[in-house]
């Protein structure tokens, strides 16, 4: 059930909403689902790697907001070319990842506490930079690129697929990926085996920071603005998708393709409920129930692996 339940649930939801709404399986709506989950999926890819390593990064939502603000300011106020602003935005994400690593690896603070505090501080910086207001873009080079549809598929979906493809290759076929699994499964044994665990943890947080910043760039493009309140609560959807994918909190196990399935399940659920005009209160209840189910599945998976 744990291995196949996620896919059965995803297929079941698709069949149900297909029968309930004639618009659900339309090409336009399916592409809308892909666009809607693209940023969450990119963040979830980074979170999956962190959880496999036995860590957690709760700064991803604030990272999206600060990156979008920085990119918006650089393009709109400083008149930077879009590609240079994007590079700077990714640099912001890397700096956040490095700061997280310094607290967790260098000082020894628990990753949940450290990244929760950092997330509050980072969003505060974004609010200060913009005085709490969004930064609209008049230069539409970045929005035009992000909102383009090569081969009829949104650029954001292509980015999502590319991130998961590259991450899967790295985690499956490279020594670095194997080391992430090893450190997450048994840090002491990995250290005795010669794996430089501190350097690996730093690399993990740099990865989550860079991917969250990429999500911020995508958000800036799709909304044509930078905003300090963007991705508020994004960690909730990201953790729901990752835990639904069977990636536990104990580290050492998990597969990226299951995370992608979890992301799609959340997207299908949100889209289907919206198409059926379900009251927002009940949608909130459904999201909460999905998160509880995800936590239960993760706990059961952890118990099974422990045996």
Image (cartoon, helix red, strand yellow):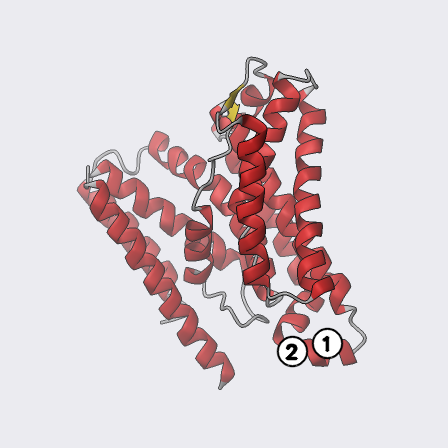
**In the image: residue 179, left or right of residue 244:** right
Most extreme residue toward the bottom is 307
Q: Quadrant of residue 64?
A: top right
Q: Is residue 280 left or right of residue 149?
A: left
Identity of the residue drawn at 18% across and 43% down: 20
Tell me if I can see residue 243 in this picture. Answer: yes
Location of residue 184 in the rendering, given as x and y in whole percent from the top left corner: 63, 71
Report if the CB atoms under discs 2 and 1 are less than 8 Å apart: yes
The image shows residue 43 at horizontal and vertical percentages of 54, 47
Left or right of 299? Residue 280 is left
At 61% across and 40% down in the image, what residue appears? 213
Q: Which mark is residue 177?
A: none
Q: Dot 2 corresponds to which residue?
A: 186
In this view of the protein, which residue sits in the foreground, 251 or 258? Answer: 251
Q: Is mark 2 on a helix, strand or loop?
A: loop
Quarter where residue 108 is shown: bottom right
Q: Which mark is residue 190?
A: 1
Label 2: how many Cα within 10 Å (few below 14, some 14–19, many 20+):
some
Closer to the camera, 122 or 168? 122
Tell me the crowding category of disc 1: few under 14, some 14 to 19, or many 20 or more residues within 10 angstroms, Cα based: some
Please state, as top left, top right, bottom left or bottom right, where the N terminus lies in the image: bottom left
Quadrant for residue 177, please give it: bottom right
Q: Which residue is drawn at 43% across and 38% down?
A: 34
Callout count: 2
Q: Is the residue 186 above or below the residue 240 in the image?
A: below
* Residue at mark 2 to residue at mark 1: CA–CA distance: 6 Å
**Residue 33 in the image, given as x and y percentages of width and height:** 38, 38
């Amino acid at each position: 059930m744990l291995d196949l339940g996620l896919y059965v649930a995803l297929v079941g939801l698709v069949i149900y909403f297909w029968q309930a709404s004639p618009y659900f399986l339309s090409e336009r709506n399916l592409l809308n689902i892909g666009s809607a989950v693209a940023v969450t999926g990119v963040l979830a890819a980074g979170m999956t790697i962190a959880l496999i390593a036995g860590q957690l990064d709760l700064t991803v939502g604030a990272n999206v907001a600060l990156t979008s603000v920085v990119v918006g300011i650089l393009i709109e106020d400083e008149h930077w070319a879009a590609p240079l602003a994007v590079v700077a935005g990714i640099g912001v994400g890397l700096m956040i990842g490095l700061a997280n690593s310094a607290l967790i690896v260098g000082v020894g603070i628990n990753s949940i506490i450290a990244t929760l505090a950092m997330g509050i501080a980072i969003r505060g910086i974004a609010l200060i930079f913009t005085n709490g207001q969004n930064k609209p873009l008049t230069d539409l080079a970045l929005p035009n690129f992000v909102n383009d549809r090569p081969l009829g598929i949104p650029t954001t979906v292509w980015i999502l697929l590319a991130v998961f493809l590259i991450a899967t290759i790295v985690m499956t076929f490279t020594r670095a990926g194997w080391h992430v699994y090893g450190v997450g499964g048994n840090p002491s044994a990995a250290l005795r085996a010669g794996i430089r665990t501190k350097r690996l943890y730093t690399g993990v947080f740099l990865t989550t920071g860079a991917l969250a910043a990429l999500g911020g760039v995508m958000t800036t493009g799709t909304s044509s603005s930078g905003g300090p309140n963007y991705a508020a609560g994004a960690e909730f959807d990201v953790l729901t998708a990752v835990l639904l994918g069977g990636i536990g909190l104990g580290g050492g196990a998990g597969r990226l393709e299951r995370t992608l399935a979890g992301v799609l399940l959340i997207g299908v659920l949100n889209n289907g409920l919206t198409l059926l005009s379900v009251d927002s209160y009940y949608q909130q209840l459904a999201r909460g129930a999905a998160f509880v189910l995800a936590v239960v599945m993760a706990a059961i998976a952890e118990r099974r692996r422990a045996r």
